[in-house]
Amino acid sequence: MNSGVLQAAGPVAQTIASLSWLLFAGGGLIFLGVMGLLAWALRRHGSAPRTRLWILGGGVIFPGAVLAALFVHVLPLTPFRQAPPADALLVSVTGHMWWWEVRYTSTPGQPEIVTANEIRIPGGRTVAIALASDDVIHSFWVPALAGKVDMVPGRRHQLILSGDRPGVYRGQCAEFCGEQHARMALHVVVETPAAFEAWRQGQLLAAASPATPAQQRGRQAFIANRCDACHTVRGAGEPSRLGPDLTHVGSRLHLGAGSLPNSPAALAHWIAHVQQIKPGARMPSFGQLDATTLADLGEWLGSLK
């Protein structure tokens, strides 16, 4: 899993990485120069230096020239109101306390693809992400693919990115947004175009029918305990947008915005111990359910791929 600022996996991140190395090198040279002047000052004997000349040169002219040169260098690289290409993949991401709602622009006549805490994109294709917040200020940041953009309630911002090579790239909310800010991770999965298209076609389908008695009992428990009051599973219960869409939750890598690796056992554990794993989350713990019911729920939800 790649999550480093300097481990660029896309053209936007590569630009940021190049600028970072330039700043590192420039800062290092300035540091050496300052240390050299300090050593010279400590060893110097005789008359005092011309203070005004040093203040004017070292405190005004030199930093002004450096900042002006840096501005001229960076300005052409800054995407002001950048329009995505016509074939760009359009994705909208909404920040919630504390999870990410992800929606893909759908073709007329097809159901909308809705997922949570995970964005899948085809390698080499430009992706235009519309960013919004449902509650407080969040910040979208996937260091290996792009810079960070704040998500302000009532406003919509755009981020352009692309991934050069397949892999899983971890992101994070970069603006303190409450008690579980640290557990608001996001994963971008870059796939080959063929793998992405297969995933996309699978996401268009309704939830898979239960294949075993345990999965059938899990589906019944989901409806009986009114889980559909907050979570949508297309084909099971009523739709809702209060919590993450679970129609294909079994295909995701993690649970709880990066809190747990996804598996049927982890799903059962999450349902029973949400408030122990992620205190303050909007979902209550369902520890009152017996072990068999929890296992059946985990088995059924894990089959939704």
Image (tube, rainbow, N blue to C red):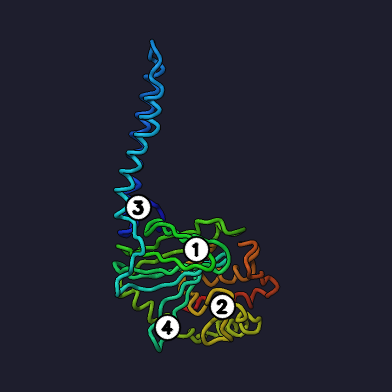
Point 63% across, 68% down: residue: 282
Looking at the image, is mark 2 or mark 3 nearer the viewer? 3
Reading the image, the residue beneath label 1 is: 151
Q: Amino acid under label 4?
A: Leu
Mark 3 neighbour class, 10 Å CA radius: few under 14, some 14 to 19, many 20 or more: many
Q: Amino acid under label 1?
A: Met
Asked if the residue under mark 1 is in contact with the one under mark 4, i.e. CB atoms within 8 Å, the reply is: no
Reading the image, the residue beneath label 2 is: 241
Q: Looking at this view, is 51 or 154 the one in front? A: 51
Reading the image, the residue beneath label 3 is: 16
Whichever of callouts 1 and 2 sits on the residue coming sooner in the sequence is 1
Mark 1 neighbour class, 10 Å CA radius: few under 14, some 14 to 19, many 20 or more: many
Per the model, the C-alpha gap separating discs 2 and 3 is 36 Å
Looking at the image, is mark 1 or mark 2 nearer the viewer? 1
Quadrant of res 83: bottom left
Q: Residue 201 location, x and y as percent?
A: 38, 81
Please, what secondary structure does the residue beneath circle 2 have? Answer: loop
Can you name the residue that lies furthest to the top here? 46
Whichever of callouts 3 and 1 sits on the residue coming sooner in the sequence is 3
Whichever of callouts 3 and 4 sits on the residue coming sooner in the sequence is 3
Q: Which disc is residue 204 wearing? A: 4
